[in-house]
Image (tube, grey):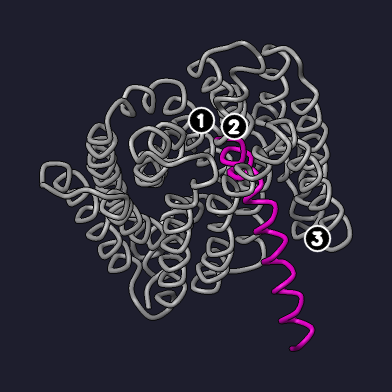
Amino acid sequence: MTRDSRASAQLTLLLTAISWLGPFAIDTYLPSFAEMGASLHVSMVQVQQTLTAYLVPFALMTLWHGAISDVLGRRRVILAGLTVFSLASLGCAVATRFPVLLACRAAQGMVAGVGMVVGRAVVRDVAEGAQAQRLMSHVAIAFALAPAVAPIIGGWLHVWAGWRAVFVFLAAVSGLIALACWRGLPETLPVAQRRPWAPRALGRSYLRTLTTPAFIGVSLSVTFFFAGMFVYVLSAPVFILRHLGLHETQFGWLFVPNTMAMMFGSWLSGRAAGRVSRRATLGLGLAIMAAAASTNMALHHLPVSGVAWRIAPISVYVVGMALTMPSLTLMALDLFPQHRGLAASCQGFLQSGFNSIMAGAIAPLLWSTSLGLARGQVAFVLLGSAALATFWLTTRPHRGRTAQAGAA
């Protein structure tokens, strides 16, 4: 292995680690919901609000992480975020009152998006075109392990040592990632390319980005397609324990197949980069998602039963979703090449903002029945398709540039 290939592998590993910390912190404590409620004397619905407390500041701060990194540099912002996350995790572990737990979860959420947002900007700092899509896909493959490993680890920690051990574990993991980044993460944004802190100009950039129909369209397509899978993550305590009849150490029934599907879809996206046009890749991914979501809903009206019948369509859906994500993300960032960090922040804000609404309102509304969740998935495919159509309809003058960046 050459020095360049070793450096590339190290960068991919670090970007993966900082990117999956945010979703890892969502899934790890899901098996502990019932015990947390009993320990802190609150209901299951109130415990669900710890997800909202995490996701709302997550959404608000993703609007700023990338822009701040455009000014201060990528490395400095990432290290600061990881440090705060570790301290907030310790706060969750020692909380004896529910309001304190909510506050510490909010502190986690404020910085958890640093890796996801700034990591995307780092990819665009170091790579272009098909190379960027491949790097994004490689990160996504490893990133996919987080949703599978997190609840399994959380379930066993819950059984062995109780729910507080989950947050001690998160503090330790984030501390180790911070140490690894301090030693091995390079600064990818030279000082000469950083933007001065000019609030008025920054405000205009935010306004321009968030009012560009093409950007809104492609970003919402990412948001809605992801929501078709994420609704099952948010509903996992109910879906797995109540609807599937499994127990706390069996969350892997949902998360492991979905992780394998995520890895396979991301691998397909990486293989397609530079060989298959971006539009063809998106078309295939959309067809897979539509077929899987329709099958998922149809199976609820057929005389079939068993865990596998409930999980398989969800996993097929994830293959299609993972196939589209790298291309959609790059399409959004390529609309604003002069401030990709800010564009990544706006994209993250739209997605995580909707995720927070899902956690607080949409998922509890859908999870009363397994069929309700399946119907929600179909709705998200339709919304994502409509949003993507908006992108194509509003980028006719720019299609030459977009196609040149992503076509074979």
- At mark 3, the secondary structure is loop
Asked if residue 339 can be seen in this view, the reply is: no
Is residue 307 shown left or right of residue 69?
Answer: left
First of labels 1, 2 by sequence position: 2
Instruction: Name the quadrant containing residue 113.
Output: top right
Q: Is residue 182 above or below residue 390?
A: below
User: Which residue is rendered at x = 36% and y = 61% of the image?
Assistant: 319
Q: Please, what is the three-letter code of the amino acid marked with disc 2? A: Ser
Asked if residue 283 can be seen in this view, the reply is: yes
Magenta stretch encompasses residue 2: yes
Is residue 106 shown left or right of residue 216?
Answer: right
Task: Calculate the distance from the C-alpha at mark 1 to the C-alpha at mark 3.
Answer: 32 Å
* Rendered-image quadrant of the N terminus: bottom right
Instruction: Name the quadrant containing residue 243.
Output: top left
Is residue 297 shown left or right of residue 6?
Answer: left
- Judge by depth and name the residue closer to the eye, 290 or 44: 44
Q: Which residue is mark 2?
A: 32
Circle 1 crowding by C-alpha within 10 Å: few under 14, some 14–19, many from 20: few
Q: Which residue is mark 3?
A: 185
> What are the residue bounds of the magenta stretch?
1-30
First of labels 1, 3 by sequence position: 3
- At mark 2, the secondary structure is helix
Q: Is residue 273 above or below residue 88?
A: below
Q: Please, what is the three-letter code of the amino acid marked with disc 3? A: Leu
Q: Nearer the viewer, mark 1 or mark 2?
A: 2
